[in-house]
Image (tube, helix red, strand yellow):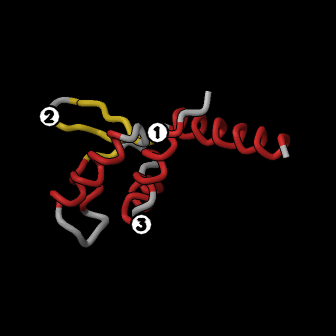
Amino acid sequence: MFDREKITKLFMAIGEPIRIQIIFLLEEPLNVTQITNRFKISRPAISHHLKVLKEAKVVQNKKVGQEVYYSINKKYIIDELRNLADKLEQLTNAE
């Protein structure tokens, strides 16, 4: 089912170039330090971007010991993009 708020939040979250880079970096689960080491921005800035991505359900996290590992929420992203494509197809067919 198409939900405008979800798709808006998704696009707003991935609309930032650093966030797109983080998403592509997460081929495997990484912690904040591992992610920060691959960028020229501060750890707090990376944490902020991860928070935005997590709130939009683009990434998910799992705590292992003291560390929190982030990974892409592929199923959610695919489902939402599929819902958007279905909605666009309905609009096209209605014309």
Helix, strand or loop status at disc 2: loop
Q: Residue at x 48, y 52 (%)?
A: 11
Separation of residues labelled 1 and 2 (CA atoms): 34 Å
Depth check, front residue: 67 or 23: 23
Quadrant occupied by the N terminus: top right
Q: Nearer the viewer, mark 3 or mark 1?
A: 1
Q: Is residue 61 left or right of residue 7?
A: left
Helix, strand or loop status at disc 3: helix
The percent position of residue 61, horizontal first and vertical second, equals: 32, 35
Judging by the rendered image, the residue that carries numbered circle 1 is 5
Count of numbered tags: 3
Question: Label 3 is placed on what type of residue?
Answer: Pro
Q: Nearer the viewer, mark 3 or mark 2?
A: 3
Q: Residues within 10 Å of mark 3 (few under 14, many from 20)?
A: few
Residue positioned most to the bottom = 40
- Label whose residue precedes the other's in the sequence (3 or 2): 3
Question: Label 1 is placed on what type of residue?
Answer: Glu
The percent position of residue 30, horizontal first and vertical second, equals: 33, 46
Judging by the rendered image, the residue that carries numbered circle 2 is 66
